[in-house]
Amino acid sequence: MIPATPHTPFIGREPLLRRLGAMFRAGKHVLLVGPKGVGKSMIVAEIARTFPLLLAPRCGCLGDFLADLEPQAKLARDDLKLAVRVHRLAAALPKTGRALVLENVARVPPRVAHLVRVLLIHQPIWLVARSVMPLDLGHVWPYLFFFQRVDVPPFSVSETRAFLAAVEFEGDRTELLASALRLHRLSAGHPGTLTSLVAELRMRTYDLRTTEGLRLLALHARISLVESQLVAP
């Protein structure tokens, strides 16, 4: 998940945002699909600035799913049985008038999928996923016919250049922008990968004019990303 911050500005995507906004106003169920790092979480965060959303970042366990949503529905957790909490939440969420967004949808277990199926009748549901394969999605896969699929495209070259112009960077901005096409190809236009590359460029100097320099940049960025994931709680 890569939210828009001073380090990762939100750039472009205006047609996609307009489309998603129209779908929200129409009360549609949305399946937002794209590979890791393409900016799905940033798009959801941007939509949430304009439209009221309920965010469920964890859907791999029913207990986590309830714990994330109960405060947003203004429900005290209390010392209730899981089944009671499920029925209480299923009754409370539609009354919020907000769309429910399941982020990081992967291998959803049966009990979470059943609750999603119940809620589909009463409020808009958005699924944010990397894949639509049954084994990847888990038990929500049979319900995909309820959803309208929206694919998140990578940045265009112009959007990559705009991102590099806006991102926080203390080094030589002119050289960074001159390397926009190379960095675009290296990142495949994925904002998350671009963010990692720029973070690495803040720490070390690379010759972006050479293939070897670009390879070293990509390698060190991947190492730094893995290290950060290993130390994350």
Image: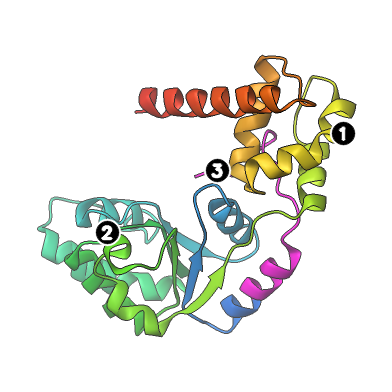
* Residue 97 in the figure: left or right of residue 180: left
The label on residue 70 is none
> Which secondary structure type mostly characterizes the magenta part of the structure?
loop
Label located before the other in sequence (3 or 2): 3
Percent from the top left, x then y, of residue 97?
Answer: 47, 74
The stretch in magenta equals 1-21
Task: Let me know if residue 19 appears in the view.
Answer: yes
Q: Foreground: 20 or 37?
A: 37
* Residue 217 in the figure: left or right of residue 161: left
Name the element at disc 1: helix
The label on residue 2 is 3
Name the element at disc 3: loop
Identified at 27% across, 79% down, the residue is: 118
Identified at 66% across, 15% down, the residue is: 203
Q: Amino acid at mark 1?
A: Ala
Name the element at disc 2: loop
Cα distance in 3D space between marks 3 and 2: 21 Å
Which residue is farthest left?
Answer: 81
Q: Amino acid at mark 3?
A: Ile
> Tag count in the figure?
3
Nearer the observer: mark 3 or 2; the answer is 2
Q: Which residue is mark 1?
A: 178
Q: Is residue 46 above or below residue 25?
A: above
Q: Foreground: 208 or 137?
A: 208
Q: Quadrant of residue 221?
A: top right
Q: Quadrant of residue 135?
A: bottom left
Q: Which residue is mark 2?
A: 107
Percent from the top left, x then y, of residue 112?
Answer: 23, 65
